[in-house]
Amino acid sequence: MRRVCVYLGAREGHDPRFREAAMELGTRIATRGFGLVYGGAHIGLMGIVANAALEAGGEVIGVIPHHLIDREMAHTGLSQLIKVDNMHERKAIMAEHADAFIAMPGGIGTLEELFEVWTWQYLGLHDKPIGVLDVAGFYQPLLGFMDDATNAGFLATATRAKLQSAGTPDALLDILESQL
């Protein structure tokens, strides 16, 4: 089975469109026949995307470090919950189980995961598609910054082109699926 790793917040954010997009993304991943890989929590957007995928009959794999099990309240109703020792192992196992990556709105953890998997792609450690779900223009400032970094000569045009973006789950899944 092909799987999509989704990086997203353990909080819901203030805009209800974030919640709606997480529900739609989880549902669409499952109905398209993909499995979901994510951070293993049942709170925030993380729990919403997982529950939506489960409700749509999808496989959901969560990966969570022991030190976050109580803090993030691990989701106990998943297809599989993988418990790991640390964040480094979490990210490596999530990437290992995924065929594509999506970053939804989130905070510093989401950004760190996105940039690490994109860096791994740049270094040739994988060639899996990566995209951001730009709900309500959330990622526009970051995408603009990446364009500025490219124009300033700090990011190769080909590397910048590898980070895809779309405003809806279906549009982004279409883009990523075409690259699998």
Image (tube, grey):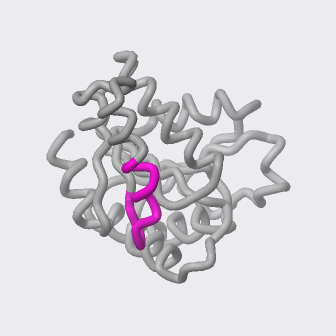
**Does 91 sit above or below residue 120?**
below
**Does 96 sit above or below residue 130?**
above
Q: Is residue 46 visible?
A: yes
The percent coordinates of residue 71 (x first, y second) are 83, 55
What secondary structure prevails in the magenta region?
Answer: helix
The residue closer to the viewer here, 139 or 180, is 139
**Does 50 sit above or below residue 110?**
below
Q: Is residue 69 left or right of residue 102?
A: right
The percent coordinates of residue 83 (x first, y second) are 70, 40
Q: Residue at (44%, 24%) from the top-left corner?
A: 120
Q: Is residue 115 left or right of residue 136?
A: right
Q: Residue at (52%, 38%) from the top-left corner?
A: 94
Viewport quadrant of the N terminus: top left
Q: Residue at (56%, 45%) from the top-left corner?
A: 111
Q: Is residue 57 visible?
A: no
Residue occupying the far front of the picture: 152
Q: Is residue 143 magenta?
A: yes
Part of the protein shown in magenta:
133-144
Q: Is residue 31 magenta?
A: no
Q: Residue at (67%, 66%) from the top-left corner?
A: 11
Q: How many marks?
A: 0
Where, by quadrant of the figure, is residue 135 drawn?
A: bottom left
Viewport quadrant of the C terminus: top left
The residue closer to the viewer here, 75 or 129, is 129
The percent coordinates of residue 63 (x first, y second) are 62, 44
Residue occupying the far left of the picture: 178
The residue closer to the viewer here, 81 or 124, is 124
